[in-house]
Image (spheres, coloured by chain):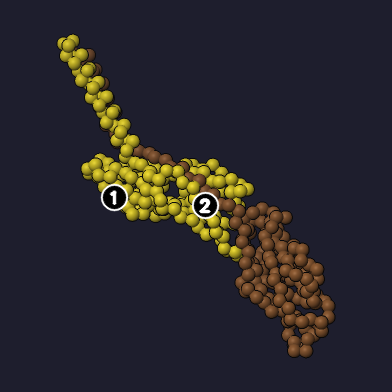
């Protein structure tokens, strides 16, 4: 009996370790932003009107299909936020793009891509279109400092 | 036997945990820096305006003014708009009178007297605002008979103050 228990323990331990090892890389690669940190600068103001919005489409989001229908949500942390930031998923290969999301510090996560289908290990991707807008009333970075956003994307079951 | 059951239960729990770990939400982050430098912009709706001076024979019935629309957008604090002319003298002396100003901008009327190449305050307290006003040019005095047609360049500047 005793040798059997020892064997069971060894087997169980190996299974558990393999399971954990298998889970970790999967988690790490399931969702990734390509493009790194970026700086968006507004450069134009029209006299008598508003400032001209600035857009950036250099970043992409790569995600792996899950065992269940899933979605990607987005939120931001930006203490003292002064300027408006929006994000929209475009060119979505797998799933459905949600309407453009306004990123406001402290707000709960909002859907960015929904209905990501299941099956296989196929990767999906989309382009992130960031839009910055500001009004003259918001002031400027020279006097008030830049807005620094830590934008979080989460892939989860829908 | 009891030990074997305990171990089996532990193994099942470990396997379930590893499965749940695989199904957990994945998260990634990106850093974004938004920069809005100070953007101050001022423009004129009409590039050139003709100011008719009353008193000249051919302009008896003409009103003593010409009008132009000034527009501005200012994101800085403690800003004002000044006005200056390229060269002196201007005869007769001209005044710039702002009208129909967008609410929120306090205004100082400026007389553009002869020897007024120095910038004069025209619109004060335009901090963090966008708006417009009409500028009426008015003769402030002098002898119209002496006036010959002349061309001047008027410069509007957003500056600290």
Q: Find numbered disc 1 in the image and state the secondary structure of the residue it sits on.
A: loop
Q: Locate the C terminus of chain A and report the quarter of the image it occupies.
A: top left
User: Is residue B132 left or right of B90 when viewed as pictured?
Assistant: left
Q: Nearer the viewer, residue A23 or B21?
A: A23
| Residue hosting label 1 | A94
x, y percentage for residue A114?
33, 49
Q: Is residue A82 visible?
A: yes
Determine which of the numbered discs, if any, sits on residue B118 in the image: none
Q: Residue at x 27, y 31 (%)?
A: A22
Q: Residues within 10 Å of mark 1 (few under 14, many from 20)?
A: many
Q: Which chain is yellow?
A: A
Callout 1: chain: A
Callout 2: chain: A
x, y percentage for residue A113?
35, 49
Q: Find numbered disc 2 in the image and state the secondary structure of the residue it sits on.
A: strand
- The image shows residue A19, relative to residue B46, as above or below, that is above
> Which numbered mark, 2 or 1, is in the foreground of this view?
2
Answer with mark 2 or mark 1, whichever residue precedes in sequence.
Answer: 2
User: Is residue A72 left or right of A108 when viewed as pictured?
Assistant: left
Q: Residue furthest front?
A: B87
- The image shows residue A137, relative to residue B98, as above or below, that is above
x, y percentage for residue A25?
30, 33
x, y percentage for residue A70?
30, 44
Q: Residue at x 68, y 62 (%)?
A: B157
Q: Which chain is brown?
A: B
Q: Locate the N terminus of chain A and report the quarter of the image it occupies.
A: top left
Q: Residue at x 73, y 66 (%)?
A: B84
């Amino acid at each position: 009996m005793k040798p059997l228990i020892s064997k069971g323990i060894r087997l169980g331990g190996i299974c558990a370790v393999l399971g954990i090892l298998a889970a970790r890389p999967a988690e790490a690669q399931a969702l990734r932003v390509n493009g790194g940190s970026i700086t968006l600068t507004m450069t134009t103001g029209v006299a008598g009107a508003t400032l001209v919005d600035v857009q950036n489409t250099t970043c992409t989001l790569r995600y792996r299909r899950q065992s269940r229908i899933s979605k990607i949500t987005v939120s931001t942390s930006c203490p003292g936020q002064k300027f408006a930031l929006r994000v929209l998923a475009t060119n979505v290969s797998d799933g459905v793009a949600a309407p453009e999301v306004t990123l406001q510090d402290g707000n709960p996560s909002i859907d960015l891509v929904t209905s990501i289908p299941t099956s296989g290990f196929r990767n999906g991707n989309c382009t992130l279109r960031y839009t910055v807008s500001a009004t003259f009333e918001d002031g400027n970075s020279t006097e008030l400092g830049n807005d620094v956003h830590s934008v979080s994307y989460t892939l989860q079951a829908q | 036997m009891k030990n074997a059951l305990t171990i089996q239960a532990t193994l099942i729990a470990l396997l379930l945990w590893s499965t749940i770990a695989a199904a957990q939400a994945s998260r990634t982050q990106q850093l974004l820096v938004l920069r809005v430098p100070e953007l101050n912009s001022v423009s004129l709706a009409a590039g050139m305006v003709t100011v008719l001076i009353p008193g000249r024979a051919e302009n008896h019935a003409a009103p003593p003014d010409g009008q132009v629309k000034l527009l501005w957008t200012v994101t800085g604090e403690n800003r004002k708009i000044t006005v200056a002319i390229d060269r002196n003298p201007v005869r007769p002396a001209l005044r710039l009178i702002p009208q129909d100003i967008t609410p929120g901008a306090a205004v100082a009327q400026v007389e553009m007297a002869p020897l007024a190449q120095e910038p004069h305050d025209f619109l004060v307290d335009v901090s963090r605002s966008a708006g417009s006003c009409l500028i009426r040019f008015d003769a402030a005095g002098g002898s119209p008979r002496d006036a010959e047609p002349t061309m001047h360049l008027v410069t509007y500047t957003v500056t600290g103050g």
